[in-house]
Image (cartoon, rainbow, N blue to C red):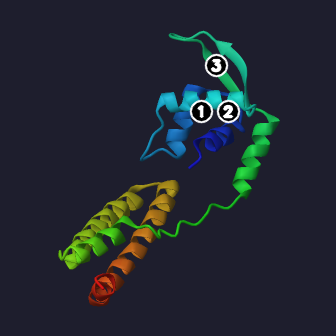
Amino acid sequence: MSIGHTLLGLLESGPRHGYDLKRAFDEKFGHDRPLHYGQVYSTMSRLLKNGLVEVEGVEPGDGPERKRYAITEAGITDVRRWLATPEKPEPYLQSVLYTKVVLALLTHRNAAEILDTQRSEHLRMMRILTDRKRKGDLADQLICDHALFHLEADLRWLELTAARLDKLAQAVTR
């Protein structure tokens, strides 16, 4: 996720302080990975330097002065361009799990055991996400669905690889 673009998008509804941006980000996108304040302020500094935001006002606070940031026209254009650009699909051609299976075969370890252990871990995570989805709001349901679909694809790959393990062993140990 582009944190800079996300913060810019949040600023389109109106000027905000860094604290308010962090709170809005965490509420909408940071359930599992909230932003650190330092990340917000370093990102805002970079956006300011690049002309995508401006300081609309400075107010005294308990600590340092509080800057209120506003998005510029260049920032709006940048967000529009980012939203219109499709994300590159991640084909996972350098899968750590695939590497582990092949290395297990090359070193005469039990690759089927690795697949079984991973299958159990995927199923455990799917139970957690299904529970979270059941209890969550629509945003939580959608993000959990996204993760569950990826885990389901991984499970299909685990099953297919387990079924082809003998052939894979022959292919990689030649």
Residue 99, quarter of picture? bottom left
Is residue 15 among what the camera can see? no
- Residue that numbered label 2 is attached to: 47
Marks 1 and 2, Cα distance to the nearest angstrom? 6 Å
**Between residues 115 and 121, which one lies in front from this camera angle?**
115
Residues at discs 1 and 2 in contact (Cβ within 8 Å): yes
**Residue farthest to the front?**
174
Q: Which of the two discs, 3 and 1, sits closer to the camera?
A: 1
Q: What residue is rendered at 44% in x and 63% in y?
A: 147
- Residue that numbered label 3 is attached to: 67
Q: What residue is rendered at 63% in x and 27% in y?
A: 45
Q: Reading the chain from its start, which is encountered first: label 3 or label 2? A: 2
- Residue that numbered label 1 is attached to: 43
The crowding category of the residue bearing disc 1, from other C-alpha atoms within 10 Å (few below 14, some 14 to 19, many at least 20), is some
Q: What residue is rendered at 49% in x and 64% in y?
A: 146
Task: Say what amino acid the circle numbered 2 marks.
Answer: Leu
**Residue farthest to the right?**
73
Task: Say what amino acid the circle numbered 3 marks.
Answer: Lys
**Between residues 150 and 14, which one lies in front from this camera angle?**
150
Per the image, label 2 sits on a secondary structure element best described as helix
Q: What residue is rendered at 52% in x and 34% in y?
A: 23
Percent x, y of residue 104: 23, 73
Q: Reading the chain from its start, which is encountered first: label 3 or label 1? A: 1
Task: Say what amino acid the circle numbered 1 marks.
Answer: Thr
Percent x, y of residue 115: 26, 75
Marks 3 and 1, Cα distance to the nearest angstrom? 14 Å
